[in-house]
Amino acid sequence: MLTAEDKKLIQQIWGKLGGAEEEVGADALNRMFHSYPPTKTYFPHFDLSPGSDQVRGHGKKVVAALSNAIKNMDNLSQALSELSNLHAYNLRVDPPCFSLQFLSQCLQVSLATRLGKEYTPEVHSAVDKFMSAVASVLAEKYR
Amino acid sequence: MVHWSAEEKQLITSVWAKVNVEECGAEALARLLIVYPWTQRFFSDFGNLSSPTAIIGNPKVRAHGKKVLTSFGEAIKNLDNLKGTYSKLSELHCDKLHVDPENFRLLGDILVIVLASHLGRDFTPVCQFAWQKLMGVVAHALAHKYH
């Protein structure tokens, strides 16, 4: 359960990215495709080579969705409602509890490489919980 | 048997050379107990685990973290025989410690994040790949003797 403190930490840490959010998105996706090759099966139509414009573009989309979620942490269900439908009925990515776990790990690695010591255990915990909450909402309509 | 390419071995050993085993071990174990508080169930005799500050400063957590990461060092010297290297530890975790192997995956992911925060951009995607692979193989070896 996200506490008020967790929410504050997440907003602060996202704020520290200062415009680098898109880079983080692309980096996270790149890392995910590298470390967890099965995730590539959802992107047969993409050029997944390093520096790919498609990966950058998609990373930007993912990060925009997360930024929106962060602005609406008190009502994630509603904020992510459309994405939830998309994942459940169109994309049908293997239940987010599994796949999002990989994106969550890679997003956190990406944040940690940029933030170093500022990615404290408390921030780490808050972000991990947040990504879990996002995954739950995205999985809500699967069945 | 797991196959390690020369590049993967190089990525693993070059990162390992930069690791302060005592610091990183302590940090990884502390984060495990903070981020996944249910893991505290295995450390009921460790004293004060009541807050992140308490956990980070807890001398038993630090000592045990160092022990755990030191054993990783052994794994890295024996990449071609991880099951053999971890055979006794696997039995211990099953028979005496009763640790659900899922926890090995959690600790592995946390260690990767700790490395990322220490190494910054040097912890490239290919580096991460080699280390996530290592974490997976270590977790598998540790679970191997479960029955």
Image: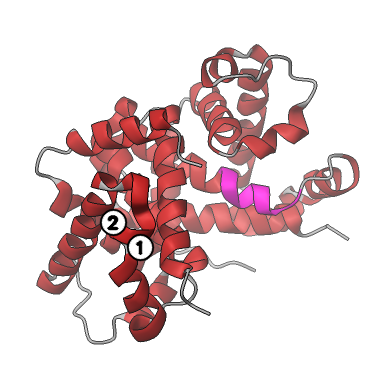
- Visual colour scheme: secondary structure
Residue that numbered label 1 is attached to: A32
Compared to residue A102, the image places residue B39 above or below, namely above
Residue that numbered label 2 is attached to: A28
Q: Residue at x 39, y 50 (%)?
A: B11
Q: Residues within 10 Å of mark 1 (few under 14, many from 20)?
A: many
Q: Chain of mark 2?
A: A
What count of labels does the image hold? 2
| Residue B119 visible within the image | yes
Compared to residue A34, the image places residue B139 above or below, namely above
Q: Position of residue B51 (x, y in %)?
A: 57, 19
Q: Residue at x 48, y 77 (%)?
A: A142
Q: Is residue A119 left or right of residue A129?
A: left
Q: Position of residue B66 (x, y in %)?
A: 61, 25
Q: Determine which quarter of the picture holds residue A123.
A: top left
In the image, the segment drawn in magenta is B100-107
Amino acid on which the number 1 mark rests in the picture: Met
Cβ atoms under marks 2 and 1 closer than 8 Å? yes
- The quadrant in which the C terminus of chain B is found is bottom right
Element class at badge 2: helix
Is B127 colored magenta in this rendering?
no
Element class at badge 1: helix
Q: Position of residue B88 (x, y in %)?
A: 83, 46
Q: Nearer the viewer, residue B43 or B108?
A: B43
Amino acid on which the number 2 mark rests in the picture: Ala
| Label of residue B138 in the image | none
Q: Chain of mark 1?
A: A
Q: Residue at x 51, y 66 (%)?
A: A98
Question: Does the magenta stretch mainly form a helix, a strand or a loop?
Answer: helix
Q: Are marks 2 and 1 on the same chain?
A: yes
